Image (cartoon, rainbow, N blue to C red):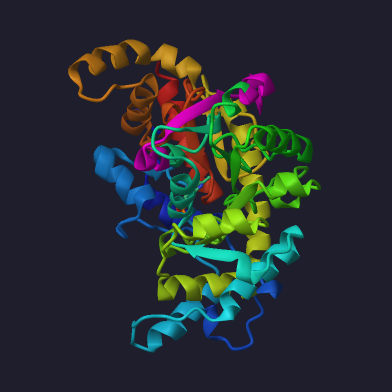
Amino acid sequence: MAHRAQLDRRTFLRGAGAAALLGGARPISALDFSSGSLNPGSQVVDFDAPFDRTGTDCTKWDGAVQDYGDVIEFGMGIADTDFRTAPCITRALAERCAHENWGYLRRPAKYAEAVSEWNQRRYGVEIDPGDLVWTTGVHSALIAALQTFAPPGTRVLMTTPVYSGFYTDLRFTRTVAEDSQMTLEDGRYSIDYDDFERRAARSNVFILCNPQNPTGNCWSPEDLMRMGEICLRHRVVVLADEIHCDFVNHGQTYTPFASLPDREIVNNSLTYKAASKSFNLAAMKVSWYYSTNPDLLARVRSNTRADMPTLGLVANHAALTEGEPWLDQLLPYVDANQDFAEQYIRDHVPHVTYRKAEGTYLAWLDVSEVVEAIGAKDTATRESVASVNPVAPEDVVQRWFAENAGVFLGPGNDYGTGGAGHMRMNLGTQRRRIQHALDNMAAALAQI
Ligand SMILES: Cc1ncc(COP(=O)(O)O)c(C=O)c1O
């Protein structure tokens, strides 16, 4: 820690406000929602404003400290964001909290209508509100689908590296991962279709991640059609997880699987969504799935039970009906974070390479040189002998960055085949924090 840039969390919180690049516009403050005339579209949100989440039992910061102790200065792991929420959400929650009763809840049509209108407006996808099934998170929804289509012991196809959480869903349903490792050229991942088809032929289900966590790939209509066509031919049901779909960087496009021009391909799928990434509502536990195929939908629905939380529905309704202007300011900010990280890593951080993601607020860092430089493979082999669970070189790299740079990153081996030599860094935070974390990493790496 001695080499680390001399910027700790407290210094950051004191100083970062001065860096707000507002050009004189009035930022939305915590309590602006008290104004009845607030029009969030007319105000500039200050995403640079410092915001401290420590001490709230959040996984991203408090969980990292729990794992590695007080050396942690920057929690850059789990996929949520560090910004003050949209004022419309705080206002709706405050109004609901003022009525102090928390009994069982109905779910009037306005909730499903808000989801349907949002999807129509933003992505051009028509969803009949009656075809929408609520769940308390995408995980429980995927688990219901796996329990429907993939009995224990059967295989679930994924293009890897892919979101680590899918593997926990597979463990829960006792299904088997069928990793189709993507090929990597000039920092961009592509699907190896021969491998994909060979594995599809022995799988029951394909979990599509679009945009893909952790690589950021926004799949093109051609790729989606090709994957969809292979899955249809081999009777593999497509579960399209599109939870990251709002985070699409400039020059890129999000194509909803359900918008593909071939009805048979679309009818072989279910789509999984939430506002939880876009509005940082992950612990509010609201998500939904839908399908154009009434048979698939009915089968999964019969395995789904979700009693929705009051505050979750209130927050989601506010986000979907009033939060768009806020989100439309967040997205370019996060896109600029991605540009910033790519450039800053290239200019300042030795042994790490990063090519900007097409979507998501995640950065998939190539740290293969760090693995070599710190002897992570030997350490992992040695520690595995003494440990009940195998230790991967990326686990060693995670610990090394935590202890030497105070930065918590996600180890690449958690993301399936092809995750070796990588770490996932969450860029959904204030830009100054990204800079400080990268400075810390650069200072530590300069010593090796
Ligand atoms: C691709 C993807 N799917 C699902 C989830 C988790 O969704 P939920 O919190 O709604 O269960 C995440 C969280 O990071 C994710 O990245």
Q: Residue at x 29, y 58 (%)?
A: 55
- Residue 192 within the segment the image draws in magenta: yes
Which of 25/340 is in front? 340
* 151 on left or right of 112: left
Q: How many marks?
A: 0
- Residue 3 within the segment the image draws in magenta: no
Residue positioned most to the left: 386
Residue 232 placement (x, y as % from top left): 68, 38
Residue 66 placement (x, y as % from top left): 25, 44
Q: Residue at x 63, y 59 (%)?
A: 294
Q: Quadrant of residue 327?
A: bottom right
Residue 296 placement (x, y as % from top left): 59, 53
Q: Does the image show residue 180?
A: yes
Which of 158/292 is in front? 292
Q: Quadrant of the C terminus?
A: top left
Q: Does the image show residue 20?
A: no
Q: Residue at x 50, y 78 (%)?
A: 107
* Span colored in magenta: 168-197
Q: Is residue 273 above or below residue 37?
A: above
Q: Residue at x 52, y 47 (%)?
A: 432
Which of 415/412 is in front? 415
Residue 248 placement (x, y as % from top left): 68, 47
